[in-house]
Image (cartoon, rainbow, N blue to C red):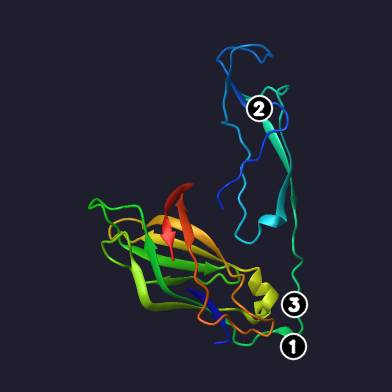
Amino acid sequence: AASAGATAGDEEGGRLVEGSSTTLEPLRAYEQTKRRIPSWCDRVLWCSWPGCTAQLQQLCYASVPQIVSSDHTPVHSTFALTLACPRLESRSQLIPGLRLFLSDLRAEHLTSHDANGLADPYVEVRPSFSQQKRMLPVRSKTLSPTWEGESLQLPVPASRAWAASLEAAHLFIRLIDRDRYSRDDTMGSGVLSCAGLLLSPSGEPVAGGVLFELPLTCCGVKAGTLY
């Protein structure tokens, strides 16, 4: 569960509007007739963080068959991105001592990274409002780890400690496999929105915190779920 208090995407592709992305047979020049093989190798993909989908809109997506660059028809896309202008609220709107808590986490359907078919996972959390990382301890030989009764505390800097800033914040979470003899492996990662943790601008937290279900991915492949 995620909570706040004062002590608190799958990628999208879009549709081509002109022609399609096609693969040409080797040694053949670009032409409008025959022997083109439909393909979707050249695509423009994008992904928004949770709570930011409306800020990124695709305006145009089209192919350009008249440009010769490879054995694929090039494509292009234009996007509109809405950026929020950062600003410091007045002292009356700041929430002193604002903290976030992640508690009683558990994960399911993780992918094995060890020869025994299991893993030794731990959790790493980095908030968007700080460069400091927080970690939960290793759970040995399991693909369904739990951290019941344990919590991570994430202090919010005073310069970001107001309701609107917290609503726009995110937590970058990784499940990592501890390896004694080599570099630790990332098992899966996800981005968690902090929106909805406060009931009012004064900093009143949601009673009992907010439950979440965070899909994890690794190299674009589904890699389990964190609760």
x then y, percent, for residue 179: 31, 59
- Reading the image, the residue beneath label 1 is 92
In contact (CB < 8 Å): disc 1 and disc 3 = no
**Residue at the spot of label 2:** 20
Residue 31 visible in the displayed image:
yes
Which SS class for mark 3? Answer: loop
Residue 225 vertical position relative to residue 8 in the rendered view, above or below: above
What is the x, y in percent for residue 224?
Answer: 41, 55
Q: Position of residue 134 (x, y in %)?
A: 46, 72
**Residue 219 in view here:** no
Q: Position of residue 63 (x, y in %)?
A: 70, 29
| Residue 227: quarter of image | bottom left
Which residue corresponds to the image point at 60% horizontal and 60% vertical from the top-left? 50
SS class of the residue under badge 2? Answer: loop
Of mark 2 and mark 3, the one earlier in the sequence is 2
Q: 84 left or right of 186?
A: right
Neighbourhood count class around disc 2 (C-alpha, 10 Å): few under 14, some 14–19, many 20 upward: some
Q: Is residue 148 left or right of residue 58?
A: left
**Residue kind at label 1, given as amino acid type:** Ser
Front disc: 2 or 3: 2
**Residue that lies at the very extreme toward the front in this rendered image:** 207
Residue in front for this viewpoint, 57 or 115:
57
Circle 1 or circle 3, nearest the eye: 1
Residue at figure coordinates x 61%, y 24% from the top left: 22
Distance from Cα at disc 2 to Cα at disc 1: 55 Å
Q: Residue 71, relative to residue 149: is it above or below?
A: above
Identity, as a three-letter code, of the amino acid under mark 3: Leu
Bin the neighbour count of mark 3 within 10 Å (Cα to Cα): few under 14, some 14-19, many 20 and up. Answer: few
Three-letter code for the amino acid on which mark 2 is drawn:
Ser
- The residue singled out by tag 3 in the image is 88
